[in-house]
Image (cartoon, grey):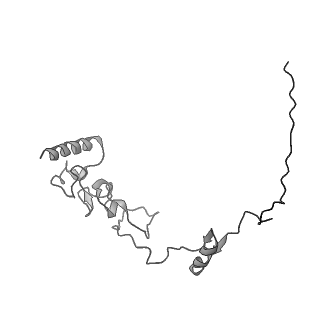
Amino acid sequence: MAPKIEVKQEVIEINDSSTSPVQNTSPLKPIFCLKNRDEIEKFEEKEECFILEFDPYSNPDVLRLPSAVIDDNVDADLSVVAEKGQVACRDYPHPRNTCARFPFEKTPHDKHCEMCYCYVCDLAAPCLKWAGAAGHCHAYNNEAWDEERRVTRQLTKTV
C-alpha cells in the first residue's frame, strides 16, 4: 500500500482594494443605439462600439443599381436591388464559363460580354474557333477542355 500524501489547500482572497486609479467600475460599457446619421461623428470620437438602427449605405451616391441583364427566369425568392464595388466575373476579364452577365448554365454559350475571354485560347471572346457544336464557347475547366487548352498553348509557343 502506497503512503498517503497530505495535500494542503490554500485559499487566496482577492479584494477590490487595489491602488488602481479606476476603482469599482465594471469592464462592461453601455452600447449606444444611433437612430440617425447625424450622431455618427459625435459617437465615433467617444465610443468604440455602437449600433446603427439605420442603413449607413442608404445614400444613393454610395450604391449603384446592378447593371446585369434582367432575366425572367430568375428565382423570385431572391432579388439584388443594389451592389457596392466591382464584381470580379463581370467588371474584370474572365473566362466565358464564369461570366456574371451571361450565366453559363442559363444562356447560350456563344453569348459573351466585352470582358469574356476564350478558356482554351486565352484570347478575347470570340476567338476564331468560338462558334459551332465543338466551339470554344462551350469550354470550361474539365479534363477534355484542359487538354485542348494545353495543346493550344503548345502550338502558340512554337509559332
Residue at the spot x=25%, y=64% of the render? 114
How many callouts does the rendering have? 0
Q: Quadrant of residue 62?
A: bottom left
Q: Nearer the viewer, residue 87 or 29?
A: 29
Percent across and percent down for residue 67 are: 35, 70
Q: Quadrant of the N terminus?
A: top right
Left or right of 50: which side holds 119? Answer: left
Q: Which residue is outermost to the bottom?
A: 38
Residue in view at x 58 percent, y 77 percent: 40
Residue drawn 26% across the image and 49% down it: 139
Q: Nearer the viewer, residue 106 or 156?
A: 156
Q: Position of residue 109 (x, y in %)?
A: 26, 55
In-front residue for pair 5/124: 5
Q: Residue 120 at what x, y percent from top left?
A: 23, 49
Left or right: residue 83 versus residue 133 is right
Quadrant in the picture for residue 80: bottom left
Residue 141 position within the rendered picture, expressed as x and y whole percent measured from the top left: 30, 46
Q: Residue at x 80, y 62 (%)?
A: 19
